[in-house]
Amino acid sequence: MDVLRELVLPKLEAVKKSGAGFMARCPVPDHHDRQASLSVGQGATHPVVLHCQAGCTPEAVSAAIGLDWADLCKPREKTNRGDDTWTPAGPAVAIYDYRDEQGELLFQVCRTANKDFRQRRPKVGGGWEWKLGDTRRVLYRLPKVIEAVANGEMVFIVEGEKDVHSIEALGLVATCNPGGAGKWLPDYTEALRDAVVTIVSDNDNPGRAHARLVREALTAAGADVTISEPTVGKDVTDHLNAGLGLEDLAITHHAEEPAKPQLAIDLWDFLAESDAPHDWVVPGLLERGDRLILTGFEGQGKSMLIRQLAICAAAGIDPFHHERRHQPRRVLYIDCENSESQSRRKLRPIADLTKGFRNMSPIPAGGLRLIHRPEGIDLTTDSDAAWLIERVTAHRPDILVLGPFYRLHNANMNDEVVARRTVAVLDRARTLNGCVLITEAHAGHGEAAVGRSVRPTGSSLLLRWPEFGYGLKPNQLAVPDERGRCREMDFVSWRGPRDDREWPTHVRYGRPDEMPWQPYKPDPIPEKGHRK
């Protein structure tokens, strides 16, 4: 092993080539090094020599990067291949050995300071060939992987060699494939047949796609596969360097257990069971597992009502009476229409209002998490469907707000098959954690606002799919303002309710110191021919 390039340099920051060695920032916490003042190199008889210009001891430096100085001081391995650091892209700061089952070197991956990766294989008699040709490709740390699989130990699959070393520093077994994301080969699958595996994907779309590709291959080979991703930074090394542990990774896919055959329940056994009480997420309004579609005419405030529901739920406040009626709920809000700046302008005043309700606490940190996809998503595609399932698995929300519905696929809104595929993914996401699902849809177009239907446009499936469908409709006595918006609205049920709920029947737009929508009792509609 090249201790300097495989263990030490990947853990340092601002590494630059300097003469025969390298310069880097000193990692000792008390140093607060802003300049690269740590000299790192190979010694004459030892693999690593560390010298901090500010006086930090080698023991303190090695401890700061999670390594033991005694291990680093073991005599270095001799090589007959000259300057191992040279690559066509500049000096290597890390060199990774890929070995076969017997430990014989097959090839190396060299990483430069600017993250250029070059591969090389040893020549007979010395030197390097910078083309792998038909050299056999294997998993990184293959001998350790084979031993771990045989012993039933967990194997972590990451995207790069640096991450392998970060997990190995915890005393665990990790591996990756050469070439990075999207380069998984059938031979790698065979080495992990029937293994217990956790894939730690990079926190980006190529990384997640790679994780899904590897999961499908390993699951077909009998492996027990879980997928997780870092909660901080781009990769697991960033995650660990932030002081977090592997237990803090966000799980986006659980290993699936095979279903056990089970006979359907007998009628009398079914009737003998008692009914559980309502599992309220928002008491009187939303029960766990509910599906709610809110509709309304363009520009009349349905999106604002959904924001009000989300924020109040996250704060533990009744959305219409502003009293604490439940514990704060976890809300995942995926906005597929508005940009971050547009959303921020709308959310800030509502969130600020929660601080002033009867001295109640504001929304807890992490209580309402936001994802903005203004370009929309297409849940009829495997990639976007998998993305949504991963987000819900990772966040485990009590309420999932997603939409508007027309931004959840790219096909004709009236297409029944497309609508069925879309809601199938939504139902799968909803049942993962038994969360409430809220989305919005546009009502039909027309000139006379009062006489228009608030039923959603598009496939008729939307009329049958949710437990509840409500629409904002201008009250008959409401007078539009100069922008054409009505301040008094009827809250009309167009689907359900299947049991009694406490939704208001009329709402008005609130004052600046109130939530946007407030319940109210409208004046009675005068009889025909009667004048006030």
Image (spheres, grey):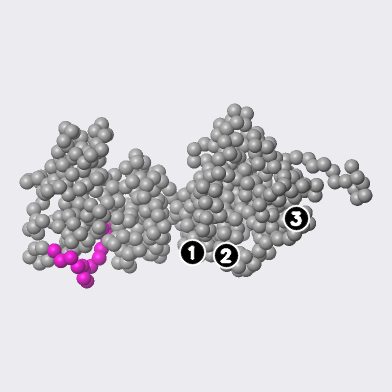
Q: Mark 3 — residue?
A: 449
Residue, disc 1: 382
First along the sequence among labels 1 and 2: 1
Left-right relation of 296 to 43? right
Q: Nearer the viewer, residue 419 or 393?
A: 419
Gap in angstroms between the C-alphas marked 3 and 2: 32 Å
Q: Residue drawn 60% across and 31% down?
A: 356
Q: Give the image location of residue 495, x and y in percent.
A: 72, 55
Q: If you read the primary sequence from the N terminus, does the residue marked by circle 3 or circle 2 appear first? A: 2
Q: Amino acid at mark 1?
A: Asp
70 left or right, relative to 14: left
Q: Quadrant of residue 462?
A: bottom right
* Rendered image quadrant of residue 322: top right
Q: Is residue 8 above or below residue 177?
A: above
Left or right for 323, reference 6: right
Residue stretch rendered in magenta on the structure? 128-148
Q: Which mark is residue 421?
A: 2
The residue drawn where x is 25% and y is 65% is 137
